[in-house]
Amino acid sequence: MEPQLSWYLALSAVLFTIGVTGVIIKRNVISMFMCIELMLNSVNLTFVAFASFFQDVTGQLFVFIVMTVAAAEAAVGLGIIIAIFRNRESLDVDDASILKL
Amino acid sequence: MDTQTALDIALKLVAITVAFTVVLLIVAYTVLAERRVLGFIQGRLGPNRVGYGGMLQPFADLLKFIFKEDIVPDKSTRFIYFLAPVVATMAALMTMIVYPFGPELRIPFTDIVIPLTIARLDIGLLYVLGITSIGVYGIMLAGWSSNNKYSLMGGLRSSAQMISYELALGMSLIGVILLAGTLDLAQIVEQQSGWHGTRWFILFHPLGFVIYMIAAIAETNRVPFDLPEAETELVAGFHTEYSAMKFALFFLAEYINMFTVSMLATTLFLGGWNVPFAEDIFGRGTFLFGLVSAIGFILKVIFFLFLYIWLRGTLPRFRFDQLMNFGWKILLPFALLSIFITATLIFLFPNL
Amino acid sequence: MLVLLFILFAGMAIGCALAVVAQRNPLYSAISLIGVFISLACLYVMLAAPFIAAVQVIVYAGAIMVLVVFVIMLLNVEEEAHRRPRLKFLLPVAIALSAVLIAEVAFILVSVQESRITPASGSADVGLTQSIGSALFTRYLLPFEITSILLLMAIVGAMTLARRGGLLSGNDKTRRD
């Protein structure tokens, strides 16, 4: 008996849900960022599972591109977080809820 | 599971144990060799009292480390404090399973063929690069968890240096991948065999070799790039607060890293286990050929280790901003240039 | 045998993911997230995608998380200590909504299970570096080029944001340090 496709999809769904829960619960902006990365990874798992079970390499290519986009987003996002931290001296998301500096 | 799978797993476990023991022994004697060679360079004798000429010194050091008092700083985060040396050592040791130590050994009067590579991964080179990236965490977490400003600064500087030079390391290896056409390390060594040493990749990619050596020295935090952990700067950097066995693990991790990087240089550039005239004398696939090739591999690795120790005794250290400047503004463009040169060479002379 | 491995790696992934959400110290969350990435890389190897597994370790666990841990250490982020009273309803709501989400997905999965897809993993021809490379440079060349421009934009953006004088400091060339 081998792991079925639906098992991988179920694992991906559970990881995605945990990521969504984290984004809602957490108040530290870096922790929220990490939960977003968790969601991206669960989607990557879905892509790779489908690529493996349908013998198509397109899924893995998409994962490659998603990883690249996630890296770019991490760099710019952390730059923004540092810039906000310099201004407001706090990493709480609620402290950054108004647009006025 | 059936007996064939169980036999395979048992064989792999034996192979891993043997490789682990060999690596640890070589690393222990590298520490001794470093102290003696440095002594000769600096005009003094190294440690030569314990055993004949100092040969039992590593064991004496080991006993000292085991019996030393283990000091844990008071306000450190304990889980990360204990995790950091484990991560560093694990990442150093995990890379050794993909290196081809030799061709297949054939036991003389039987039919058993023992492959001298523990795991023949299709993505061997990427695996090594990945594990090297994980090794950065050991240093970062050590610097943070010691709750000491100097450790934190040392840890951050050291990890910034490591991730900067990882780029140049990876790029210099792209030329080798272009020449070989595969990421499998055993295949790369196979492609350098024959023609008595004129097909070693160092001849076709020399700039890449130089860049690789420089980046490798920076990756392993050795002189001239060892500002973050030197004894006279920053009070020994990220391993200030570690004593006894945990410090021994960091020390070990650094030397195993050195060994691993030398093995990678030998495999990729100097032809791995290919000894120039061994094929004519012994013939492929015999036991003596395998043995001579494995010994040749170890000798080449020892040459690289000697090079490291030689550089330690000779060159002064870089300042940290000079180091980062060199890594990003000089080494990275040269690495890109080396890829262009090698790609042009392959395009113009497709005779390999 | 494969089922055991799947349960091991999936359990590790879910455990570390729960630790990411439940830990209050962001450094521990980051370390748990690295655990999630590594267990996902092991799952990719099981799914005959070794190249993607190696790239996952190199890019995610080895570069992105190093950046995140750097930022956590530099900004000296503390634990989430007190909770302000007006957001207290979020935790039960989050758990309730996530339960709804899991129920929806479970329904979809049960209905997918009835249509039998032949599990054809293991024949390792689709995840090799060569097939990914040849597809990337022939059929999917446009996404590849666009991704490279995206990376260039990210580099320029990150450098602009992290400049010492801030975004609007002007081109003051007389300062040299």
Image (cartoon, grey):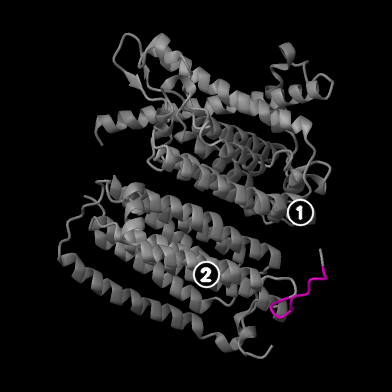
Q: Is residue B351 above or below residue B156?
A: above
Asked whether residue B102 is in view, the answer is: yes
- Mark 1 lies on residue: B321
In this rendering, position of residue C157 left or right of residue B291:
right
* Residue B341 disc label: none
Which segment is the magenta one? Answer: C166-175
**Quarter of the figure that contains the C terminus of chain C:** bottom right
Q: Chain of mark 2?
A: A
In this rendering, position of residue B265 left or right of residue A89:
left
Viewer-proximal residue among B26 and B177:
B177
- Proximity of marks 2 and 1: CB atoms separated by less than 8 Å: no
For numbered disc 1, what is the local secondary structure? helix
Viewer-proximal residue among B180 and B257:
B180
Judge whether residue C168 is colored magenta. Answer: yes
- Mark 2 lies on residue: A73
Q: Is residue B23 above or below residue B128?
A: above
Judge whether residue C120 is colored magenta. Answer: no
